Image (spheres, rainbow, N blue to C red):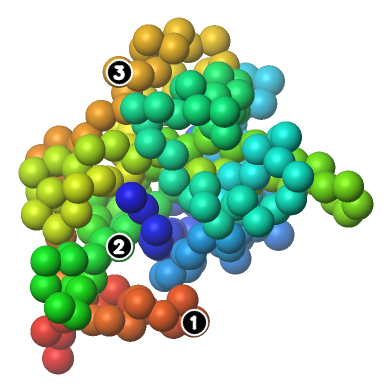
Amino acid sequence: MCGRFNLRTNPDEFAEFFAAHVADNDRQLLLRYNIAPTQPLLAVRETNGQREAVSLLWGLIPSWSKDAKIASRLINARSETAGTKPSFRAAFKRRRCLIPASGFYEWDGHVHPKQPYHITPHNVALMAFAGLWEHWQPSSGEELETCTILTTQANRTIGTIHDRMPVILGPDEYEDWLREDTPPEHLQKLLRPATEDLLDLTPISTAVNNVRHTGPDCIAPLHAS
């Protein structure tokens, strides 16, 4: 799964990497060390052939849901079944997005207490998770736009600590993922584990365990002096 991640970049770097401009009122989302479920995050989607960076709430609320409580249970969607599950199939067909990240966190449950790891792309500063977004209108109040992160079976690197990982798309796959007319069979080919050389794992302190910890100590290596 993917239950916590970070994004550490600036507007120019983000725009160059994703070909999407970040509005001034969303720029505070570009430097965050401990992004957690139900919080806002920055996503990239395509509208009328143009990419846009938007703020979405992490935890998808299907359009048919009666209340927002379901969001905390739908922070991830299994890529193997997202195209057919009632909660995700409409978004999978029409509302796909990228979730930019600098790194994500996973906990090794084979040891006690669980050891957190910071997982980052090798030799690059940014990556993108495959995401789905949805809009939901409560009986009263403003419409909410929410999202979920797709997961897949872990590769051997991540498999040493967990059996699932987020789907990480390559830059040459962004356009196909975002376009509404990409055939479903091609979309499924994109939803695979990352190659073994893509990610680095670094054991870190337990600061990240607490969602109230939002500073750079969240990514401090375990044995850093």
Residue 65 seen in render: yes
Task: Please report the residue visible at 68 percent of the width from the left and 20 percent of the height from the top.
Answer: 48
Secondary structure type for disc 2: strand
Classify residue 153 by image quadrant. Answer: top left
Alpha-carbon distance for marks 3 and 2? Answer: 25 Å
Which labelled disc corresponds to residue 212?
Answer: 1
Which labelled disc corresponds to residue 105?
Answer: 2
- Going from N to C along the chain, the mark reached first, 2 or 1, is 2
Q: Position of residue 26 (x, y in %)?
A: 65, 57
Task: Please report the residue visible at 16 percent of the width from the left and 50 percent of the height from the top.
Answer: 158
Q: Is residue 196 above or below residue 214?
A: above
Q: Position of residue 195 (x, y in %)?
A: 15, 36
Label 3: how many Cα within 10 Å (few below 14, some 14–19, many 20+): few
Nearer to us in this view, 100 or 18: 100
Residue 221 seen in render: no
Amino acid at circle 1: Arg
Amino acid at circle 3: Lys
Alpha-carbon distance for marks 2 and 1? Answer: 15 Å
- Which residue is the extreme one toward the bottom? 225
Secondary structure type for disc 3: helix
Q: Is residue 67 above or below residue 62?
A: below
Amino acid at circle 2: Tyr
Label 1: how many Cα within 10 Å (few below 14, some 14–19, many 20+): few
Q: Position of residue 16 (x, y in %)?
A: 45, 41
Task: Please report the residue visible at 18 percent of the width from the left and 66 percent of the height from the top.
Answer: 109
Q: Is residue 219 above or below residue 3?
A: below
Q: Is residue 11 left or right of residue 48?
A: left
